[in-house]
Amino acid sequence: MKYWQLSVKTLLLLCLAFGSWGAFLVSYATFSGRDPCPEIFTVHVCYLVFSGYLSMLFTQVFPAGSNRNKIFTIAWILVFGFAIFGVVAELLVGDICPKNNVGMPLCYISLLLALCVMTLFQLLIKLERNNANIS
């Protein structure tokens, strides 16, 4: 693994770990009844976002398989979709998304993180292909 590929992979793993941990904390707060997140069809959105971040993380931790990119992309679409929906709802309606300690809606952070994750993932794929062509 080349230096740039390793650097991008490390940044991607850190972003996914951060997203997974954040989604876990929100899910735990919802599960314990302290600060519930919105529901869709009786399922709390934070549980789905947590499963999405965790799925993306697992695809990067375990060895590459034929479905790795497909699973990653499906999980990313789930996370990105809820984040963009949350941001739009927050802007139009207000007080939809759970907030962090400084009062910033977490859907804003999740949207930014999802965009960073996809950028890093696409860059990693490009670097992997370039390294495969060089070898």
Image (spheres, rainbow, N blue to C red):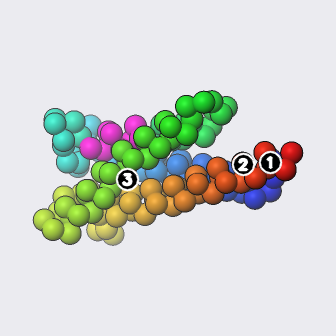
Q: Secondary structure at mark 1?
A: helix
Q: Residue 10: horizontal and vertical position, in percent?
A: 67, 52
The residue range painted magenta reads 45-52
* Residue topped by disc 2: 129
Amino acid type, callout 2: Arg
Query: Disc 2 versus disc 1: distance between alpha carbons?
Result: 6 Å
Left or right: 117 in relation to 109: right
Q: Evaluate if marks 2 and 1 touch, with contact meaning CB atoms under 8 Å apart.
A: yes
Q: Residue at x 75, y 59 (%)?
A: 4
Task: Give the residue number, with chain letter if any, for mark 1.
Answer: 133
Q: Secondary structure at mark 2?
A: helix
**Residue 32 location (% of width, % of height):** 26, 38
Q: Position of residue 76 (x, y in %)?
A: 44, 47
Residue 27 is tagged as none
Q: Residue at x 30, y 58 (%)?
A: 84
Task: Give the image quarter of residue 48.
Answer: top left
Dot 3 or dot 1, earlier in sequence: 3
Label of residue 80 in the image: 3
Q: Label 2: few (<14), some or many (≥20) within 10 Å?
A: few
Indicate the secondary structure of the residue bearing disc 3. helix
Q: Tell me, yes or no, if residue 99 can be seen here.
A: no
The answer for how far apart the CA atoms under marks 3 and 2 are is 25 Å
Earlier along the polypeptide chain: callout 3 or callout 2? 3
Between marks 3 and 2 in the image, the one whose residue lies nearer the viewer: 2
- Is 94 inside the magenta-drawn segment? no
